[in-house]
């Protein structure tokens, strides 16, 4: 969850995959249901989360933000 509002967009656009409990409401994270209908989208969200926290050298080796 790197971009502001990204979590809210995921929760609104695909609540069958991305969800949260009250415990996580103020966290910069989202829960993901196993067995999503769009595993590619889930994988891309995970790659983005990694990229947002990666070191500069790792980002350069990986390429543009997914």
Image: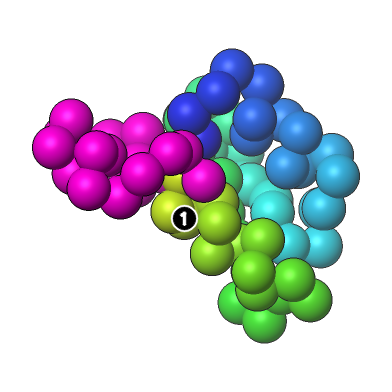
Q: Is residue 29 magenta?
A: no
Q: Quadrant of residue 33?
A: bottom right
Q: In this rendered view, identify the residue nearer to me: 9 or 62.
A: 62
The residue sitting at 24% across, 38% down in the picture is 60
Q: In this rendered view, identify the residue nearer to me: 50 or 21.
A: 50
- Residue 32: percent from left, percent from top: 60, 61
- Check the image and report above or below for 5 versus 54: above
Left or right of 41 in this view: 49: left
Magenta range is 49-66
Left or right of 50 in this view: 12: right
Prevailing secondary structure of the magenta residues: helix
Q: Is residue 64 magenta?
A: yes
- Residue 3: percent from left, percent from top: 55, 23
- Check the image and report above or below for 5 versus 51: above
Query: Badge 1: how crowded within 10 Å, few (<14), some, or many (20+)?
Result: some
Q: In this rendered view, identify the residue nearer to me: 66 or 46.
A: 66
Provide the residue designation for mark 1.
46
The residue sitting at 30% across, 50% down in the picture is 62
The residue sitting at 74% across, 71% down in the picture is 38
Q: Is residue 54 visible?
A: no
Mark 1: secondary structure: helix
The residue sitting at 79% across, 76% down in the picture is 37
- Residue 22: percent from left, percent from top: 61, 38
Left or right of 6 in this view: 30: left
């Amino acid at each position: 969850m790197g971009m502001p509002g990204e979590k809210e967009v995921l929760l609104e656009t695909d609540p069958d995959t991305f969800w949260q409990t009250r415990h996580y409401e103020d966290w910069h994270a989202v829960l993901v249901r196993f067995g999503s209908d769009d595993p590619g989208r889930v994988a891309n969200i995970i790659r983005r989360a990694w990229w947002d926290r990666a070191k500069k050298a790792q980002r350069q080796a990986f390429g543009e933000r997914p």
